[in-house]
Image: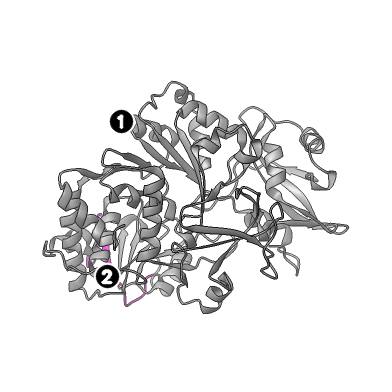
């Protein structure tokens, strides 16, 4: 296990400087080039006053500049803060005010038109691309730095990354990720998936998501190659997988679904592909079967949070070959070095096998808390260091975890609990349904009733009555949707999770009481 993020690039550059580290979309870099450029940037950042513990923020799509910034910050003992490039200016302003970065490295296109005051006055901005007059350019800044490694690093409990959560239930919070948290996660996944210097990992999600930057760091730590993606279009992903003979792919179910729907996926060459790791949102049994058939690779599901650096449970390739449908609906068992339990969300008392409660996680990978959020940090933990995930689930007698839903997404109708994910899985079994989300809406009689938002396969639009009857054949009537809505797409956060709160809001915004 490496002792710091900086140690990863130092070791790989010393071992094989000519090996390609980053390829795919954008500029290609070897480990030697990445080491030198990150050292130059580190020295230049130090010249701007960046010191140990300062934040260095990055705002752009996936690019080699991300890794130059990551390793430059690491070589100073500074904290990397990846930012969501899809945020609106007011949202970005809130995060920048919270993080207070000493330096922001940002794409020219993302800064153009940003209102004054979005970036704190104390933050120096370096522009990637074409800097406007009077603005510092990224390449000029980097070129001004000495190529000598500054020699600093963050280790142990020192913060290495400040990563703002996607915010499925509300405002984004800065998740503090220590060097020990991050490198424990890297070591855990290296041991599980055994990538090596010959590995070529396709990473479509944005780097500000832990699944993308985390998996990329796993690949780089063993000298493997990251196949970088800026615009994750399904046809482009197929092209990249073929052109780079990718061996590993870190995908979210939404992307998997888009790829397998492509006609050319049926004849594509996936012979080099060994492993597909997926997570961030549930996957239907039907989609999983199609994906396994098309890709012909080992599939592993990973369940985790930003607060656990993406590490929690794993559903192994052997589990995916199981004939037990309950096994395939699970998120697997606790990863090595991680403890997972299910507790009463009110009292914290342990739930017995088969009982639903809140999923809690404990291990060296677990964050110490939220940036400058004392109360939120206190609420995040139960006694004994157990992190509250906010997910409802249950463990079986063999330790397999099944995620039911977000605690706040459970619908209470006439005193009965309805788990949206259960209804969604039934809807997904209908041949016309591409994907579905179920939420509770106000009901004068029952308090709440379930409504289903369904996206259909092209050219297939069954009647509402048919879908509701389909559910009633498989579920208790009180669990079945009272109504079907037909959006063109479901709202998602950048990590692919469906934002049920966005679907609920129009129904609850005029009431004093809100659910979830």
Query: Is 125 colored magenta in this rendering?
Result: yes
Whole-percent x, y for residue 148 in the image: 11, 64
Residue sitting at 51 percent across and 26 percent down?
Answer: 293
Residue 131 visible, this orientation = no
Magenta span dominant secondary structure: loop
Residue wearing tag 1? 243
Q: Vertically, is 231 above or below 61?
A: above
Whole-percent x, y for residue 166 in the image: 50, 59
Determine the image quadrant of residue 309.
bottom left
Of residues 131 and 214, the one nearer the viewer is 214
Residue 312 visible, this orientation = yes
Q: Which labelled disc corresponds to residue 77? A: 2
Query: Is 394 colored magenta in this rendering?
Result: no
Magenta region: 119-135
The local crowd at label 2, few if under 14, some if 14 to 19, many if 20 or more residues have their Cα within 10 Å, is: many
Determine the image quadrant of residue 330.
top right
Secondary structure beneath dot 1 equals helix
Q: Disc 1 to disc 2, how far (Cα)?
A: 37 Å
Residue sitting at 83 percent across and 43 percent down?
Answer: 476
Of residues 466 and 6, the one nearer the viewer is 6
Asked whether, in this view, residue 496 is left or right of residue 236, the answer is right
Residue that sits furthest to the right in the current view: 445
Of residues 372 and 171, the one nearer the viewer is 372
Colouring used for the render: one colour
Residue sitting at 31 percent across and 57 percent down?
Answer: 1
């Amino acid at each position: 296990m490496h002792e710091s993020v900086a140690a990863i690039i130092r070791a790989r550059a010393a071992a094989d400087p000519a090996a390609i580290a980053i390829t795919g979309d954008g500029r290609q870099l070897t480990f030697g080039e990445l080491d030198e450029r990150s050292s130059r940037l580190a020295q230049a950042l130090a010249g701007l006053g960046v010191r140990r513990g300062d934040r260095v923020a990055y705002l752009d799509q996936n690019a080699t500049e991300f890794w130059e910034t990551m390793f430059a910050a690491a070589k100073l003992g500074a904290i990397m803060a990846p930012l969501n490039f899809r945020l609106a200016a007011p949202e970005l302003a809130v995060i920048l005010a919270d993080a207070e970065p000493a330096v922001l490295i940002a794409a020219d296109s993302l800064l153009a038109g940003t209102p004054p005051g979005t970036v704190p006055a104390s933050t120096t901005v370096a522009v990637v691309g074409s800097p406007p007059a009077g603005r510092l350019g990224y390449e000029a800044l980097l070129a001004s730095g000495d190529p000598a490694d500054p020699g600093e690093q963050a280790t142990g409990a020192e913060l290495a990354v400040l990563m703002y959560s996607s915010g499925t239930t509300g405002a984004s919070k800065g998740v503090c990720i220590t060097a020990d948290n991050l490198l424990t996660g890297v070591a855990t996944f290296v041991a599980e998936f055994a990538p090596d210097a010959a590995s070529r990992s396709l990473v479509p999600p944005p780097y500000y998501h832990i699944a993308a930057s985390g998996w990329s760091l796993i690949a780089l730590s063993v000298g493997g190659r990251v196949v970088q993606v800026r615009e994750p279009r399904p046809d482009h992903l197929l092209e990249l997988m073929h052109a780079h003979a990718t061996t590993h792919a870190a995908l979210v179910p939404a992307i998997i679904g888009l790829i397998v729907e492509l006609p050319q996926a049926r004849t594509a060459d996936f012979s080099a592909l060994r492993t597909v790791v997926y997570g961030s949102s549930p996957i239907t049994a039907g989609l999983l079967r199609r994906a396994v058939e098309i890709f012909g690779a080992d599939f592993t599901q990973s369940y985790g949070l930003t607060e656990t650096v993406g590490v929690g449970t794993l559903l192994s390739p052997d589990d995916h070959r199981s004939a037990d449908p309950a096994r395939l609906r699970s998120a697997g068992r606790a990863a090595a070095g991680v403890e997972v339990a299910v507790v009463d969300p009110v009292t914290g008392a342990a739930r017995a096998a088969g009982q639903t409660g809140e999923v809690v996680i404990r291990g060296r990978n677990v964050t110490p808390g939220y940036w400058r959020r004392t109360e939120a940090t206190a609420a995040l933990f139960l006694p004994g260091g157990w992190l509250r995930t906010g997910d409802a689930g249950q463990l079986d007698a063999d330790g397999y975890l099944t995620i039911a839903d977000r605690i706040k997404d459970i619908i209470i109708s006439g005193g009965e609990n309805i788990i949206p994910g259960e209804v969604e899985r039934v809807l997904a079994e209908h041949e016309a349904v591409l994907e579905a989300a179920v939420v509770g809406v106000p009901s004068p009689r029952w308090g709440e009733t379930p409504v289903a938002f369904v996206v259909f396969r092209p050219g297939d639009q069954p009647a509402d009555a048919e879908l509701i009857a389909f559910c009633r054949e498989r579920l208790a009537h009180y669990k079945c949707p009272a109504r079907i809505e037909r959006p063109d797409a479901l709202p998602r956060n950048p990590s692919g999770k469906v934002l049920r709160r966005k679907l609920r809001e129009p129904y609850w915004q005029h009431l004093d009481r809100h659910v979830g």
